[in-house]
Amino acid sequence: MGWPFVGRDAELAAVRRAVRGAGLIVAGPAGVGKTRLLDEVACDVRLRATSAMSGIPLGVMTPFLPEVEPSPLAMLHAAQFALRGRVVVVDDVHLLDDASAGLLHMLVQHREAVVVATLRSGERAPDPVVALWKDELLPRIELTPLGPAEVTEVLETVLGGVVDSGAASRLWTACAGNMLLLREMHLAARWVSHDGVWWLDGPLPLSPRLIELIEAHLAAVPDEERRVLELLAFGEPLDLAASEALDGLVTVATDGLRLAHPLYGEVLRAQCPPLRKRNHQRHLASVLDDPLRVAVLRLECGTADDPSLLLTAAQLAVARGAVVLAERLARAAWSVGGGAEAGQLLAQVLVFSDRPEEAEEVFAMIGTDGSAVVRALRALNLAWGLGRVEEAAGMLEMNAARVNLLFGAGKYAEARAMMTYEEPEEAAVLAMIDVVEGRYVGPFPEVPMREEFSLAWETTRFAEVFVRSLHGDLDGAERIAVRAQEEKAEWDSIRSMWAVPRAALARARGRLDEARRLLRETRPLRPYAQLCELAYVEAQLGNDARDVLASAEEQAPQGMRPYHYGLWLARIWAGGASPFDAAADVRAHGELAAEALLLHEAVRLGHAAETAERLRELAATTTGLLVPVYAAHADALVRNDSAALEEVATRFEKAGFMLHAAEAAAASGNRALFGRLVGHCEGARTPALALMSAASLTRREREIAVLAARGLTNKEIASSLVISVRTVDNHLSNAYAKLGIATRAELALALSDDSG
């Protein structure tokens, strides 16, 4: 009879309910019975994460990966497609590699699969796993130890008869209701039956600690079987046969033989003498055919002397987003004679790990005799990473790289003139120039990945998100950005890079709290863009963001001209800068898409009359999807046309811009429409939202009240609005009187209540 399932009726009901929903996290200490609980659940796929596979990117997903591993995206899609629409049970989810954890998070977040997973309490789990319950994507329950009655029932079921109450009590006391401990004690114990009652023959072979119990149990395993266990500990899953002596210690999974519990592997590896450990690793390296696993084993045992193997493994690690392992393997390949190819891969990893100085050291050592792609990557690292733009320009051969540098410098006409249309990467740069100048019509060009420098393709995806975002295609941009960040769950620098556009897109949708969380959780080495967006978000939440803005100003780099409007947005909202000065600045550089966006910020801040004509011109001469809506918004406000404002709100909502939609609805006076739309705007406090219930305030009073609520002094407000301090005092006093308040703190609260 198998190990029985008792005493978990409530938990089993919770799991079965979860299978009909999105899933569940079942947490608890090692051995409490989490896996046994999930054995009672019908599922389509059962995965078991292990310590041995935790260092292999997408290791647990190996059965679903193509035999020939192409791009990271293709590999991820293969696993995603295999699991889509299925009930997936994952044992020991805390042992997942980061790439598999990211895929799991994506499946749950997009409701593509039902995921029920076990988690060992107190263990560090990958960030995507933590986010499953932290972000309330899945509920989490804690599995507690069994009581004395349940332990007795388990033993009597296993033994097929009545158990001596003293023996049952001793076992319950020793295991404290932990199912794994109980099973190990039962397996290690000597049972005798007298008159239909089972008794313990001798003392319990136990210890209060799990490791000691496992050691006691493993001590009885014959040498040959122990060798099997040790091989599994270092290389599971393996295609090995299991003897009866290993019953209860191993399981036969779809991908081979595995240890029955990860803790067995931990004990076996800790107990294995160094010489025997190296022998096991050498043997496994000689029989396995997975180059990544083989390379890792050879590194561990000191026999990694094949540069070709190491280089192949490093490329696979890059494809799976395992930055630490990729760097380790690339360095090893280079150190044993991998030559320029290994050096190029190492340099690529360092560039995209935001370590430009180290990358340049490697580039300098391998020289510039490599391919044009290598020289282009080195040049871009010099320009963007180290600020050595002139030196970078002198070594460029790829025309796409040249026009990319010109684009970054804001020299759009020169970049257009230099286009040869011979390199596919040029098309992406041209799309960025077009969108900045208001000429983009789409679709975004297909740019093939260069396999030898697959990470450089990340910049192409970033370009597409930039283009789609500025053009007004919010859905397309967010879809790419979310997936791109999730694919690089282990790659901190790339994950940080993607956090900023993800936050900007969330902010555009009105999800300001989400945007703030994304920005505050990321730690880029060069935080300029992050700080600009954070200042913008904080200000729209009604917070004083002047310190964040000051930090962004200090970090502002040379170049990055096309992205300068992000700093202007922060200056307008956090520092009270004039949106008209901002619009004039970008217009002078031919950046008409940014001009339309910044003029609409003026509309949001109560300056519709001053912007309406120019927005109509831009709507007629540029291609941005939202520019006509910006113009309609300004025109409807000038005419105070409630019906037109309702239509504008509907158009913004259809495009996904919920905060803009709620602001237009507030101006329309339609409380039902406003209430529905503002419900999508997390904590937003803007002048336009305050219109709905603070309607007694004049436009100027509202404008001044919002700036005061953000923490600006009367003098700063006067400077921002080009009015006298006395005028600010008067308007603020009137606002206080109308709202029935007396302090700035009450003002912030009143405006918050008004917007909610």
Image (cartoon, rainbow, N blue to C red):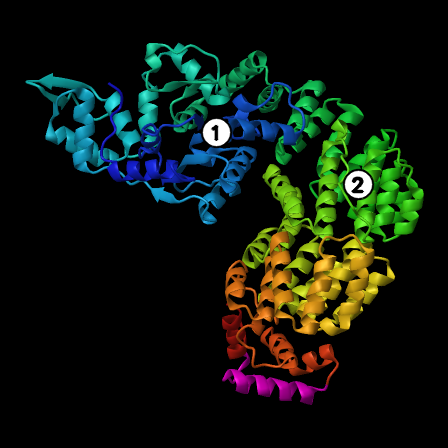
Q: For residue 378: magenta?
A: no
The image quarter in which residue 297 lies = top right
> Magenta stretch?
724-744
Which residue lies under the disc numbered 2?
428
Which residue is at the front of the view, 317 or 12?
12
Confirm or deny contact between disc 1 and disc 2 (CB under 8 A): no
From the top left corner, tell me how far across and down residue 455 is, in percent: 72, 35
| For discs 1 and 2, the disc positioned in front in the rendered view | 2
Whether residue 568 is visible: no
| On screen, residue 639 above or below 735 | above
Quarter of the picture holding the N terminus? top left
Instruction: Identify the amino acid type marked 2.
Output: Ala
| Residue name at image x 65 percent, y 51 percent | 500
Which residue lies under the disc numbered 1?
51
Instruction: Identify the amino acid type marked 1.
Output: Ser
Which residue is at the front of the view, 146 or 607?
607
The mark nearer the N terminus, 1 or 2, is 1
Whether residue 341 is visible: yes
| Residue name at image x 68 percent, y 27 percent | 315
